[in-house]
């Protein structure tokens, strides 16, 4: 789960992630605020009510590349 202040940032991140070579993603789903905060109760401590998120399912062998991509 990656959080963003604006939904369009989340959507752009998802698109940029989808076209990355070497990062095998099974799922890239942007979700607009406040839905993540209201419905993902278990994860509320990781993002604020005003944040949109991208839920990602990444292949285990691609996690290092994914983490590097998120940090950039």
Image (cartoon, rainbow, N blue to C red):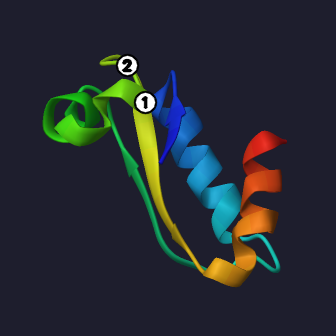
How far across and down, in percent of the image, does residue 18 sit? 64, 69
**Crowd rating for badge 1 (residues with CA inside 10 Å; few <14, some 14–19, many 20+):** few
Front-most of 69 and 41?
41
* Secondary structure of residue under mark 1: helix
Left or right side of 43 for 46: right
What is the spatial separation of the Cα atoms under label 2 and label 1, in whole angstroms?
7 Å
Provide residue 65's location: percent of width, then percent of height. Answer: 81, 66
Q: Is residue 30 left or right of residue 14?
A: left
Note whether 65 is above or below 41 in the view shown.
below
**How many tags in the picture?**
2
The residue sitting at 27% across, 37% down in the picture is 36
In the drawing, what numbered circle is on residue 5? Answer: none
Quadrant of residue 14 within the rendered picture? bottom right
Q: In the image, is residue 28 above or below residue 72?
A: below
In the rendered image, residue 21, in percent from the top left (x then y), is placed at: 82, 78
Residue 67 drawn at (x, y percent): 74, 54
Q: Residue at x 15, y 30 (%)?
A: 38
Question: Mark 2 or 1, which is nearer the eye?
Answer: 1
- Vertically, is 25 above or below 42? below
Query: In the displayed structure, does residue 9 sit left or right of residue 43?
Result: right
Task: Look at mark 1 in the image and give the residue it sits on.
Answer: 46
Density class for disc 2 (Cα within 10 Å; few <14, some 14-19, many ≥20) is some
Q: 43 left or right of 59?
A: left
Q: In the structure shown, which secondary structural element does the residue marked by tag 2 occupy?
A: loop
Give whichever of 31, 48 is nearer the camera. 48
* Foreground pick, 71 / 34: 71
Residue name at image x 70 percent, y 57 percent: 16
Per the rendering, the mark at residue 48 is 2
Q: Quadrant of the C terminus?
A: top right
């Amino acid at each position: 789960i990656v959080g963003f202040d604006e939904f369009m940032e989340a959507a752009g991140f998802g698109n940029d992630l989808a076209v990355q070579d070497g990062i095998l993603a099974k799922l890239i789903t942007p979700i607009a605020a406040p839905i993540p905060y209201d419905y993902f109760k278990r994860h509320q401590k990781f993002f604020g009510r005003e944040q949109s998120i991208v839920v990602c399912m990444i292949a285990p062998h691609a996690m290092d590349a994914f983490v590097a991509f998120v940090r950039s």
